[in-house]
Amino acid sequence: MVSYKLTVNIRFIRFVLLTLEIVHVQSAFRHDVTPSCKATDGECTFDFHINYIMSMVAYNRTSLQGFPVYFNNGTLFKRTALPEGNSSHCCENTPLSKKEMEEVLTIDGNYKFMYAINNQFPGPTIVVYENQKVKIRVYNDMANEAVTLHWHGMFQSKTPWMDGTSMISQCPILPGQMFTYKFTASPTGTHWYHSHHGAMRREGLNGAFIVLPQIKKERTDIPKVDNDVLFMTQDWVYKKSDAQAVAEQNWYMLQFSNNLNTADCLTSKFTYDSSLSTLARPYTNALINGKSKSFSNSSTENQKTVPLELFTVKTNSSNRFRIINTGITGEYKISFDEHRMLIIATDGFDISPVWIDYLFINPGETYDVIVIANNTPGNFWIRVESDEVLDAQKNRIKPNASFAQLHYQEAKSDFPESKNRECSSSDPCVMANCHWGSKTMSKWNPHAQCMSVADLEAPSHTNVESPKAFQESANEFQEFFLNFHFSGSDQRLERASVNTIHFKNPPEALQVNPETVDDQNVVCNNTNMDQCGEYCQCTHVIKVATKKVTHIVLLADDGLTKGTSHPVHLHGNRFYVLKYSTGEINETTGFTEGQNPDIQYSPDFRSAQWRNSSWKYGNVPGINIENPPQKDTVMVPFKGYVVIRLLADSPGFWLMHCHLETHMDIGMAVVLQVGEISEQPIIPKDFPKCSNFKGTKSPDKSSPAQKYQNFVQLSNVKATTQVSKAGGSDSYEMSPSSYVTMIVFLVAFFCGIVVFSSILVFKQYVRRRGYRKIDRKDKVLFGNKH
């Protein structure tokens, strides 16, 4: 077992100007990929403390004060309040020391209340080897928020309760509690982790999770890598919280600006095929490894002066960039000026190397690329562009661009003067993970090749795993059509759903309380929806039989003229992407205008099927069953479909949802129950459970004498009552035999209380073994190895 040194200050201080609780911020994120433990270590242990932070704030340990930070003429200052009662009543402006500058979290130069793990943003990077045991103790040091962490891309084979999905695999970790995640790291590749309770992912609760292959099992069909780095990008809105963005989506307010004037309506922007952009507004910049800079003349000096992320390379070196989109709404097009990318993996799965110029990446996806530093030594822009290329009137606009910098070690550090790649007939461009189709992209750039994820191929050493054989019998094959869409005939009231069912969390975590699936007042699917009207909200669960080839057709259509594509993520499994098909494209404009002709929907879009019935049982023409790529997240095009296939061999409750947090949190999700309850792994006895709060009986308002009589009657105590009148008052006497009966009853009642109390104490002890207070003796060292 390996331990790491961790220094955490969990004391809260009061930031007077903003009346927010903050803690000391350590800008400790490093983008290089370094193993957290040795390949021979059996278990790697980490401590994660989740707390509140504030960007652009310096913290003084001694005085327990926070000071706002600002730039002036290239120097970083902090504003420190003078002692109370000073006649000037003003602030001192003090330059930051070198140590203070390293500890300030600058982000994009704006003040933003957010979350952090171990006071870092992005969170600590976990780098382990395949099949190593991982133990992560998560301490919820927040005052107001519950939390869980989902290990995105981990199979969780035989440990589905460690998936980290709130109210599906576990109960949320409440403030002051600690929960320990234990699982085996598998499969290899670039993965990540993030919160999966409420809307917190973009605002600090995410980090990289890298699983390296065991020694001597590395790939030999790609260039040897000299430099291995993280490239984590995400959308960023400093003016509002993620929770507000989700609420506005639920209220259908995303088309309004902050001031909500009706004149500001119709601010939506569109992508290449005229489908709606997924970016939530007001959008500012993308972050790269938690950093961003504004070049706008209207920006503040803070926004203009904060640092960019800088990647230093050596001439002729081979550099692996592990690109992860950790955002909640934004799709991005990534490119390296005057350099090409060799794409080698996606979602941790190896693919045959392909040289590309542009990479589209959606929230939840990961892509690994190699960049060869073979240009003249200098400085080059790395561009992260949004997919918003049309305004509300469908006029062409420039996409929003954010930047990082590729710096050659042999050159002088300076701002780049590099140019973006231009495509030509003699030197065409290649765009990877392009979900709009070649007809659409040819209207934008006739000299660019648009490759969907289904055009990528598995390398030869993985082909033996491909789903080559068709299963002609329903006993060996199962097929589902899942439509991720906004349902409702009235566009003002449409709601996020899967097959017209709006997902609602159950009152109990399904994995630890599996009997909940038998409660039809909680759980539903399209076989028992007769009682539902146009709007139906419940815990949507679909049963999937084990050991069958599972064919799923992912759809994104609701009959409306405008809508979005949806990145769909499946927990605990990877799937083969066999086919990718867009909606009906207008040949003149390149815009999506109609449904894909292969699919036949029911009038309410609650169900779908192949229009050609001969396509059943996987007999779909044009699918790749020889060397398809594997993914855990795939973009489903607006009005199109994606055919995926997996072997349902991992029993458990697995969430499948749109990875746009503004869609998932308001209902675009479904649970796949793989296997019967009897087939699922037995949950540990000490695993914490949660349940609904049960109702209580109405209080008894009768008089004390009447309560006593009721007590005697309910206890079947037969008393002989003699009534005599003395002094004008009534008196009650009981026979000797009745007294004996009453004493026996009271003794039995007292013993029952003792037994019942003992059971409660025992249950409390067992429950706290899963969620318990922080034990200072259990502190794990995080940092240098010991």
Image (spheres, grey):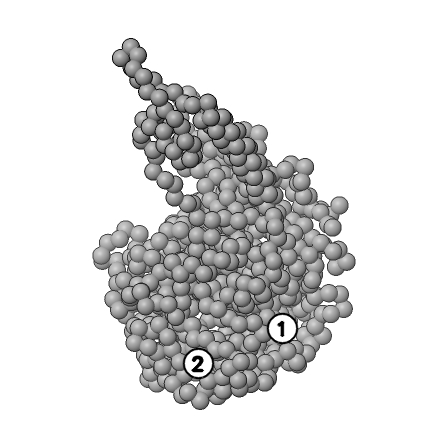
Identified by mark 1, the residue type is Asp
Q: x%, y% of residue 427?
A: 52, 82
Is residue 574 left or right of 730 when viewed as pictured? right
Q: x%, y% of residue 426?
A: 51, 85
Q: x%, y% of residue 771?
A: 57, 44
Q: Quadrant of residue 125?
A: bottom right
Residue at image position (43%, 56%) is 505
Residue at image position (62%, 62%) is 158
> Depth check: 470 or 59 in front?
470
Residue 236 in view, yes or no: no
Which numbered disc covers residue 605? none
Contact? badges 2 and 1 (CB < 8 Å): no
Instruction: Indicate the secondary structure of the residue bearing disc 1.
Output: strand
Q: x%, y% of residue 388?
A: 38, 67
Residue behind mark 2: 581
Instruction: Name the residue at the top extreme.
Output: 727
Which numbered disc covers residue 350? 1
Residue at image position (65%, 52%) is 135
> 10 Å neighbourhood of mark 1: few (<14), some, or many (≥20)?
many
